Amino acid sequence: MNPLRSLSAKLSLLTCLLVLSVIGLMARQIVSGIEEGLIGEMKVRAEFFARSSREAIFPKLDPFSLHFHVEEMLKEKVVTYAGVVDKDGVVLSHSDPTRIGERLSDPFSLRALASDRVELQHGRGKDGAPVYELTSPIMVGPRRVGTARIGFNERSLEDALRAPKRKIILIAAVATMVSALGSILIVGWLTRALPKLAAAAREAGRGNFSVQVEVRSRDEIGTLARAFNEMTVANSLLFRGLQEEKEKLANIFNDTREGLVLTDPEGRILLMNPSARALLGRQDRPAATLAEALVPDYKPKPALEAILEGSSRITPFELRREAPQLLILSGVADRLGDDNVHAGFLLIFHDATLEKRGESLSRNFLSIVSHKLRTPLAIALGNLELLRGDEKNFSPDQRKMLSKIQGEDEKLARLVEKLITFTAVQSPENIVLDRAETAPADVVDAALRGLELGPEAAVVWDAKEAAALPKASVDAFLLKEAVANLIENAVKFNPAPKKRVEITVRRADGFLRFEVQDDGPGIPGEEQPKLFRKFYQIDADFTGQIPGFGLGLAFVKSVAEAHGGAAGLRSSPGQGSEFFFTVAI
């Protein structure tokens, strides 16, 4: 560090300036005092000069003696001229012989002749410089016989004050040197630990938190050093903990099989894990932005601009690549931060190609199977109707068998119809809604009319309250089927001999909400997230495994999402269940 920038140098400079200021003020006062004392001394000399000159004037003028007194006065310091005039202003003796016999009529002389005490007068000399004159009356008793005059100027005063000024300057120089040296020594002693603290701080800045400063003093510097040592210990523990957490996060981020991409709010890539590089084909081609990473290989759905500009916390997306072979990446974009501070996005995705292919195959399979079954079932039911028309030729057992066959065929036909309906709504984004202004009460009434619930089911339904709700633009057929699925499940999965089903329709927060509540056995918490999957039913040990495809709730979920809503449930074992779905209005 530059010594001139050190604390001791700055304090020394400040001390020197302070000392010089004090000495300057004191010197000014001292010089003024000396000057005033010198002038006072000159007044005394003027009086003495007047008394000594009186002997040479009275009773008889003695020019030689008078001239002697004038010459003696000239030898005094500061005095530049001296002279004696009589009571009428005529010069009797003067240091300038040419002025002897001259009658003085200038204002200085007239004032001096009129004054009966010592007078100090200021004026200007012939060269314009300030001059001073001291006059003292020469008295013999009460009678004035003359006036003694002494003159001096600024230069003579400066000459007289030169020696005191030199002493003052010498004292100031010595005091300044002593104060500067003392400041350097004292400040150096007080701040001797600061270089150690600075070096330790630099080490801590490099990550060496084991550094400690040995300072034994108990002053403020010592307190600072001890606080620094405590800080480094705390930082060491904190840094170690942060490193461990960082390693854990790095391991999770790098080792997970899910693709992870962290971006800023504008879509600039901040981090991308190895799985994401592999899925996006960016092992050897780094990308700076999401647009660069995806275009032109992938087609995002929704569009990348919609993902980046969206305000939803979670945005599902799909990336599709057709060549060189089909690759479908499915995931979500998590919008980080809150409503006030947008911190960026975390994209989480995986290879869903096989999953999408499986869905397509299952959808095609369901469609093919349902349509292939539909025709023979229709023929079988038609022939059964013909046979039932000739029941009189059958025995009672045969008629019973025909009725049983027809009932099972009709049940199978309803399942096939459900399959056909479900295959049309497996993907909510692909559903084409046939919207029309529909009363919510009509949807529920239509669903109830299409069901054969049996006498053991008691349906509670406030049709009047629902009729008060305004109409909504919805697909009435799909909503009717969704409500029918919920009501049928509430009855079918309730093993009680008497079953109660309560239906409610209401509006809330811009949505139309359909609720179906039962008094069945309830559903365990671990099973609830699985219920809206396709082909899923709860284990037989819990429900008795009611026959069915397990597509009803998946159908409800797809219909709700196609209408901009959602499906869900609330249930606890032993307390019944409430299934619901919402549609945006």
Image: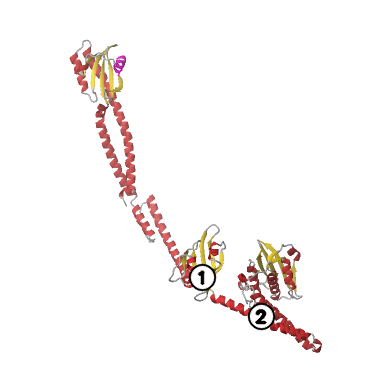
Residue nearest the viewer, comparing 185 with 132: 132
Badge 1 crowding class, 10 Å Cα cut-off, few under 14, some 14 to 19, many 20 or more, is: some
Q: Secondary structure at mark 1?
A: loop
Dominant SS of magenta comes to helix
Numbered circle sitting on residue 298: 1
Is 137 located above or below residue 128 in the figure? above
Question: Which three-letter amino acid code belongs to the residue tagged 1?
Answer: Tyr
Count how many numbered circles sit on residues in the image: 2
Q: Is residue 115 magenta-colored?
A: yes
Q: Going from the N terminus, do you reach mark 1 or mark 2 first?
A: 1
Locate residue 272 relative to residue 566 in the image: left or right. Answer: left
The residue positioned 73% from the left and 64% from the top of the image is: 466
For the record, the magenta segment spans 106-118
Q: Is residue 218 visible?
A: no
Q: Position of residue 291 (x, y in %)?
A: 49, 66
Is 305 located above or below residue 132 in the figure? below
Badge 2 crowding class, 10 Å Cα cut-off, few under 14, some 14 to 19, many 20 or more, is: some
Q: Quadrant of the C terminus?
A: bottom right
Locate residue 566 relative to residue 162 in the image: left or right. Answer: right
Question: Which three-letter amino acid code belongs to the residue tagged 2?
Answer: His
> Which quadrant of the structure image shows residue 156?
top left
Q: Give the alpha-carbon distance from disc 1 to disc 2, as whole Å.
A: 35 Å
Residue nearest the viewer, comparing 304 with 61: 304
The residue positioned 62% from the left and 75% from the top of the image is: 534
Residue identified by numbered label 2? 371
